[in-house]
Image (tube, rainbow, N blue to C red):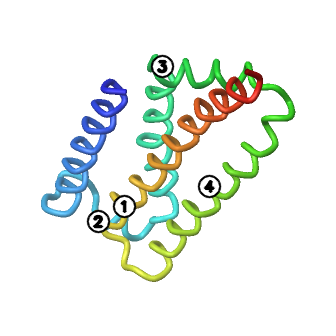
Amino acid sequence: MKQLVAIVAYYMFGYLIFWTFLHETDFFPKVWVQDNFSIAIYLWVFFFIVPLFLIALGTEYIKRRIADFKSLGQGSRWPLYILLFGVWDLMIGFAYLLFSYFEITHVTMIIANGLFITGTYLTFLSFGIAKKLQLSKNN
């Protein structure tokens, strides 16, 4: 768990540096980002979100949670799928509200990142909880 927190902290620190350079200096092409924001969002997802998920998947915490999920019985998976659908529906809904009703700033992007990181953490946490519930039900 400490490893996952450290990864998220390093990621957020790097992300703040990136947005500070973008908004306060001419180091990054701010005009291009504003004019081509849909392309910039894809770049953001590719260079920030995907590497974070890949790094997180390499941690021991996530590996143990995936092993918990793989060992779940089929009857225990459907309630978990419904729970995860609700979690991700909530996270994506909050992100949609952020981008629709607030100006897209570095604060909005940090909150959106926080939502997706929280959703990912809750997903993997729920794998472990479902496994414990299945074990307690079997005993």
Q: Would you say the residues marked 1 and 3 are in contact, meaning their CB atoms lie under 8 Å apart?
A: no
| Label number found at residue 107 | 2
2 or 4: tag closer to the N-terminus: 4
**Quadrant (top left, top right, bottom left, bottom right) of the C terminus:** top right
Question: Residue tagged by mark 1?
Answer: 111
Three-letter code for the amino acid on which mark 4 is drawn: Trp
Q: CA distance from mark 3 to mark 2?
A: 28 Å
Label 1, label 4: how many angstroms apart (C-alpha)? Answer: 15 Å
Choose between 130 and 108: the one closer to the eye: 130
Q: Is residue 93 above or below residue 120?
A: below
**Is label 1 in contact with label 2 (beta carbons under 8 Å)?**
yes
Task: Give coordinates of residue 138: x percent, y percent.
Answer: 77, 23
Q: Residue furthest left?
A: 25
Query: How many other residues sit within 10 Å of disc 4, few (<14), some (14-19) or many (≥20)?
Result: some
Tell me if mark 1 has few (under 14), some (14-19) or many (20+) residues whose alpha carbon lies within 10 angstroms of its own: some
CB under 8 Å between callouts 3 and 2?
Answer: no
Label 4, label 3: how many angstroms apart (C-alpha)? 22 Å
Mark 1 / mark 3, whichever is N-terminal: 3
Secondary structure of the residue carrying tag 2 is helix
Q: What x and y, as percent, mark residue 124?
A: 56, 35
Q: Is label 1 or label 4 in front?
A: 4
Q: Which mark is residue 88?
A: 4
- The N terminus: image quadrant: top left
Residue hosting label 3: 58
Query: Residue placed farthest to the right in the image?
Result: 75
Distance, label 1 to label 2, CA atoms, is: 6 Å
